[in-house]
Amino acid sequence: MGYNVAIDGPAGAGKSTIAKLVAKEKGYIYVDTGAMYRGLAVHFLKNGIKPQETGKIIEACKKAQVSIGYENGAQQVYLNDENITTKLRTEETGNMASVASAVPAVRAKLLELQKTLAKEHDVIMDGRDIGTNILPNADVKIYLTASVETRARRRYDELLEKGETCSYEEIAKDIAERDYRDMHREIAPLRQAEDAHLVDSSDMTIDEVVRTIVALCR
Ligand code: DC
């Protein structure tokens, strides 16, 4: 069994930024499970499926194989052996992933992959149900959150920096909707595990969050 650190929390809380830095410092492999759901979402969108078409999603799952690899330490996602990493981070893919991840067949598809990685390696794995469902015996569990306003502001600044035009209100609405879906679905909803450490990053710097988490690890 590897040494396992689980980080769960809502969209935009900074899980991946923080997890990557902790992974580097501690020599763990960073596993981004959201990217796996996004990988399946790319497959559904490629097949012309709409988020509400649950039957088609279940059927399409049968022809999708998601796997991951690493290039210079960065996680790569493969869909039926094609590297689709650059296609994962659009709003459309994120929304499809959020809706499709409530379908049990979609979750079942990724469960073994996630558990096997944690068994074979020292990992810091981020997602929504890692501490509660995938790795209930993780050595360290973190629930990383921040207010909707903080998360929307960070996303807004990020997009502005990239030169994209966007509306703060739209982003905040999108985040609030995604929170609701992720927290209220029937299967493996996002919630803080009883033994998870709560870290609210609203008024913390990235370095402060990293130091807090590193201090909890062996
Ligand atoms: O972390 P992210 O935004 O890349 O994740 C995209 C969606 O995938 C998220 O809205 C919910 C789903 N997801 C999940 O249900 N369980 C996980 N462990 C990770 C992500």
Image (spheres, helix red, strand yellow):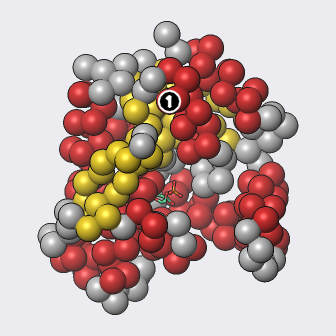
The answer to which of 132 and 66 lies nearer the viewer is: 66
Up the image or down, 70 lies above or below 153; here it is above
Give the left or right position of residue 210, taking residue 105 as reference: right
Could you tell me if residue 25 is visible in this image?
yes
Residue 48 on image: x %, y %: 34, 89
At label 1, which amino acid type do we have? Ala
Residue appearing at x 56%, y 45% in the figure? 16
Residue appearing at x 25%, y 20% in the figure? 1
Give the left or right position of residue 60, taking residue 13 as reference: left
Residue reaching furthest bottom?
48
Residue 65 on image: x %, y %: 20, 63
Could you tell me if residue 186 is visible in this image?
no
Up the image or down, 60 lies above or below 149; here it is below
Residue reaching furthest top?
218
Residue appearing at x 18%, y 77% in the figure? 59
Residue appearing at x 63%, y 67% in the figure? 177
Tell me how many marks there are.
Answer: 1
Q: Which secondary structure, mark 1?
A: helix
The answer to which of 5 and 147 lies nearer the viewer is: 5
Residue position marked by numbered label 1 in the rendering: 23
Q: Is mark 1 within 8 Å of ligand 1?
A: no
Name the quadrant containing residue 207: top right
Residue 124 on image: x %, y %: 45, 32
Give the left or right position of residue 103, taking residue 12 as reference: left
Residue 27 on image: x %, y %: 45, 23
User: Which class describes the residues within 10 Å of circle 1: few (<14), some (14-19), or many (20+)?
Assistant: many
Residue reaching furthest left?
62
Name the quadrant containing residue 34: bottom left
Up the image or down, 97 lies above or below 49; here it is above
Up the image or down, 127 lies above or below 119; here it is below
